[in-house]
Amino acid sequence: MSQIFLYDTTLRDGTQREDISLSVEDKLTIAHRLAQFGMGYIEGGWPGSNPKDAEFFRRAASMRLGDARLAAFGSTRHKGVRCEDDSNLRALVDAKTPVVTVVGKSWDYHVSHVLNATLAENLEMIRDSVAWLKQQGREVIFDAEHFFDGYRANPEFALATLEAAAAGGADWLVLCETNGGCLPWEVEEATRAVAARVKTPLGVHCHNDSGCGVANSLAAVRGGCRMVQGTVNGYGERVGNADLVAILPNLQLKMGHEVVTGEQLQELTALSRFVAEVANLKHDDHHPYSGHSAFAHKGGIHVAAILKAADTYQHIEPALVGNAMRSVISELSGRGNIFLQAKQLGIDLDSGEAQKVLAQIKRLEHEGFTFEAAEASVELLLRRLKPGYARPFEMIDYFVITERRRGRGLLSEATVKVRLGETVKLTAAEGNGPVNALATALQQSLVDAYPILRTVQLSDYKVRILNSTSGTGATTRVLIDFHSGSEMWTTVGASTNIIDASWHALADSMEYALVRLSSAGAGGA
Ligand SMILES: [Zn+2]
């Protein structure tokens, strides 16, 4: 199968998503990572549109991008202006990138209603702009904006815009599904018609408004495109661009195309999560291929089958894209889920032990705990079951007060008493609220014995009221996320008292930190 080139536009089209704002620093970091990953083309921005993108290109010029080719994006020259006098084209050349992508109109309706030009003028603008950029020694990619809508409305004119770019010497003609409303068979058919007419290599650029961004990109490849433009995680304006994180493995693992090496493909999950992190967006747990839940199995019947043969309930081997299979523990679980989870943690269980943990989980879920998102709490249940596991500390008592006094405002104070081996330690701490005071007191009581806990920080605290019809007597469930460096974990607690629910989750978090971060604290586990 033929080689397909990926063209990433996360840094330009991706940033048009409404809740993304990348600094120049962020953009350079992502560009570097994309290059490291093996992306063929990296579009850095629109240098003519804002000073941030102009600065990006200034700084990117000295970056090592390996085999990746950096592209600057802009539009064809203005009507009635010579190329050498055109501000758009000047900015593109000033970006000093090896590749320039120039967008032009291919839908007659846009030419007459938006550009206010004649069709002939538009063709000249395309041909001239491409030819002038070729004279400047650039690889030139022509993005035919609204190509598929234009082809539906006036196929001869839409094809003529591609021929004008080809006549100017374009290296690639990219068919853009700008409004994102087409369906895969339309895209494939139109692409075939273009491939029969022009010899220049073709690419595709899809948006996801109809939910078909990935499907349309794959259809275009079937129709003859050799370049696919898209963004990491499908970030982009409105509902987003075509998602390269789904497109790449589909091309390579399902359609047999050569896109990146097998080792590079194994970095896909890490790339997807990295870009989310830099963009300051929560990575979608349910993202195709790269999500935390993409290969997670919850139903007991599924897990029982997977333990016999992994491919019975998964479409690919998750390691191919750098992801991993998981078993989700919940009241829907069978013993298989427990076995699978234990196996992944390197804990040997016999069937009596698995049954015991399962019964415990079902009882606690009935009380209001939920273990699906609290894998650290599940791990502790499994570890505590094994002979030889000694809890690193034992909670004896805690005492929390909150008061509001005239002149002193709101104050919370917590005292905890814990047993550490032979010693019993009493520690008090203040906080801006009762849970904060309790967490601080617990952490302080343990750090002398376990200095590693100094690195542990609370990152999120979620409260949910269950059986809310019971009013203030309802059960409260608390999920607490902690992190230390790149390690993150979640624990759960539930009680009719929010402080007590928090206490369970906090104590589990500290115990888990000691199991994970220091073998010294694990009591031989
Ligand atoms: Zn776009």
Image (tube, rainbow, N blue to C red):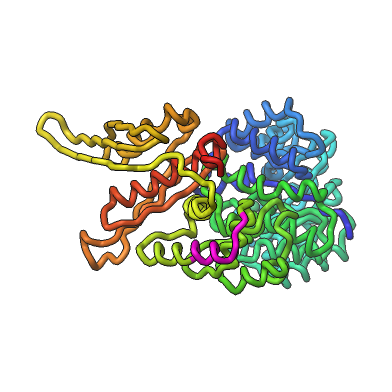
In the image, residue 267 lies at what x, y percent? 72, 46
Quadrant in which residue 51 is drawn: top right
| Quadrant location, the C terminus | top right
Please say whether residue 380 is one of the residues in the magenta stretch. no
Q: How many marks?
A: 0
Please say whether residue 355 is one of the residues in the magenta stretch. yes
Q: Say which residue appears at 26% left-offset and 62% top-offset.
A: 474
**Of 437 and 11, which appears nearest the observer?**
437
Q: Say which residue appears at 59% left-offset and 61% top-offset.
A: 327
In the image, residue 268 lies at what x, y percent? 70, 49
Quadrant in which residue 111 is drawn: bottom right
Q: Main secondary structure of the magenta part?
A: helix
* Left or right for 275, reference 259: left
In the image, residue 486 lies at what x, y percent? 56, 38
- Answer above or below: position of 48 versus 270: above
- Answer above or below: position of 238 versus 313: above
In the image, residue 216 lies at what x, y percent? 70, 65
* The residue stretch that appears in magenta: 348-358
* Left or right for 236, reference 170: left
Q: Is residue 164 visible?
A: no
